Amino acid sequence: MSYSYVRIGALSEVHLAHCPLILPRGRRVIVRTSRGTELAEIIRCLSDQTAKNDAASPETANQPITRAPTASVLRPTTKEDELLLSRLERHKREAVEACQTALAESESQSVLLDVDQLFDGGTLVMHFLGSVDSMAESITREITEKYESIVRTRHFSKLLSDGCGPNCGEQDGGCGSGCSGCSAASVCKKAQ
């Protein structure tokens, strides 16, 4: 098993991820985390032995890796993914602007810094500076519901969740194993 360090989200969190492919630094990939399916960027690919050596001190270099991966790379992004991501980014920007405007017009003291948008298109994770008051919670809930209703059209949601079929792009789903017209399959084959 090989590993990668990936950068995820607006706060550029670094995660150790299972990665079935050797990919170049800077390559955008789709990953699964505890939050869901997300966009990430490869920082560094590691072989199993390199991961052991990186995570260990000289006296523990021959012991198994001690840090558990917190993400799994599903596949590199495709042209179709990039088009979907552009559309999601536009809707996210609109949601952020609407939320910031509503917060400024309210009596809330909360400050919205940025928003992480998961690749599923229906999940926004909002990052605030300091504590969040009840007014801000109410505003963000309303904005998020509106955003999700726009993004979750039947066709768009199906493309995000299924691709060409259930578990498209996942190792168990057989990235490249079942559908010859699958755009994810062609990217997976090129990357291997």
Image (cartoon, grey):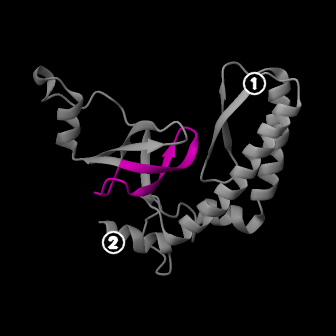
Is 34 covered by the magenta stretch?
yes
Q: Is residue 51 left or right of residue 150?
A: left
Q: Position of residue 176 (x, y in %)?
A: 42, 71
Q: Under tag 2, what secondary structure?
A: helix
Query: Which label was assigned to residue 63?
Result: none
Q: Is residue 134 left or right of residue 128?
A: right
Q: Under tag 1, what secondary structure?
A: loop
**Label 1 Cα crowd, 10 Å radius (few <14 / some 14-19 / many 20+):** many
Seen from the viewer's position, the closer of residues 17 and 95 is 95
Residue 133 lies, with reference to residue 187, above or below; the image says above
Seen from the viewer's position, the closer of residues 169 and 84 is 84
Disc 2 target residue:
190
For residue 149, what is the image quadrant?
bottom right
Residue at (47, 49) in percent of width and height: 40
Q: How far separated are the C-alphas under marks 2 and 1?
A: 46 Å
Q: Is residue 1 visible?
A: no
Q: Are marks 2 and 1 in contact (CB under 8 Å)?
A: no
Amino acid type at image mark 1: Ser
Q: Position of residue 170 (x, y in %)?
A: 46, 58
Residue at (21, 33) in percent of width and height: 54
Q: Is residue 95 visible?
A: yes
Seen from the viewer's position, the closer of residues 80 and 92 is 92
Q: Position of residue 173 (x, y in %)?
A: 48, 62
Q: Which residues are magenta?
A: 19-42
Amino acid type at image mark 2: Lys
Residue at (11, 20) in percent of width and height: 59
Q: Position of residue 132 (x, y in %)?
A: 74, 22
Query: Which label was assigned to residue 110?
Result: 1
Residue 38 lies, with reference to residue 66, above or below; the image says below
